[in-house]
Amino acid sequence: MAALLRGSALCALCRGGRVLTLKSLLIRPVALQQDRLALQISEIHTTPNRQGVSKAASHHWTSERAVSLVLLGLLPAAYLYPGAAVDYSLAAALTLHGHWGLGQVVTDYVHGDAKVKLANTGLFALSALTFAGLCYFNYNDVGICKAVAMLWSL
């Protein structure tokens, strides 16, 4: 009684701490033992094993969290100690934070190789223009900290 059964991807089995979908399992009856059917379950890997090849995503995630924490510290510092160092630090941190955030929007919503390349080029141009504009504002005008203070005083 040789039968070959391929399951659908709707059901998942948990075996040894790993989740296996029935789509990736090949089930073959091997032998009959005392009126019970013993099954041999073999895993079929449909994707190449790429575990541990790159930790770039993990480092990027950590960097995003670090910039967020730096921004949380810069906001009170901008209020308490306004100055050129805080202004330029805010310009860099805000631009980087916005660049990474909009990069995720591009990743999630833009599809197609040409469109992704165009969107990423536009994003880099926008980020460079934003940073240059904030630095110009800091150098030639009152700076980010004093500008926000002036807005609050209205």
Image: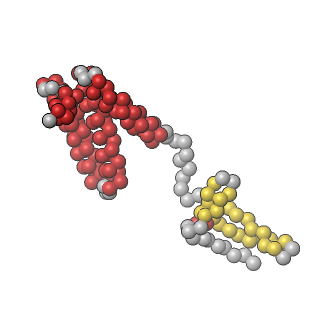
**Residue at 35% from the left image edge and 48% from the top image edge:** 104
Pick the residue in front: 81 or 20.
Answer: 81
> Could you tell me which residue is drawn at 73 percent across and 65 percent down?
40
Relative image position of residue 121 (x, y in whole percent): 25, 44
Q: Is residue 88 visible?
A: no
User: Hey, which residue is sitting farthest left in the picture?
Assistant: 140
Q: Where does residue 124 sit, x and y in percent of width and height?
A: 25, 40
Q: Does residue 2 sit above or below 13 in this rendering?
A: below
> Which residue is pictured at 27% across the width and 54% down the height?
115
Left or right position of 84 against 27: left
Residue 35 image offset from top left, x and y in percent: 84, 76
Lateral position of residue 62 relative to residue 11, left or right: left
| Res. 116 in view | yes
Report the number of discs.
Answer: 0
Report x, y in % for residue 46. 55, 59
> In which quarter of the view is residue 11 placed?
bottom right
Residue 92, compared with residue 26, is above or below; it is above
Q: What is the quadrant of the N terminus in the image?
A: bottom right
Instruction: Examine the image and state in which quarter residue 122 appears.
Output: top left
Residue for point 69% across, 76% down: 3
Looking at this view, name the residue that lies furthest to the right.
34
Vertical position of residue 99 compared to residue 88: above or below: below
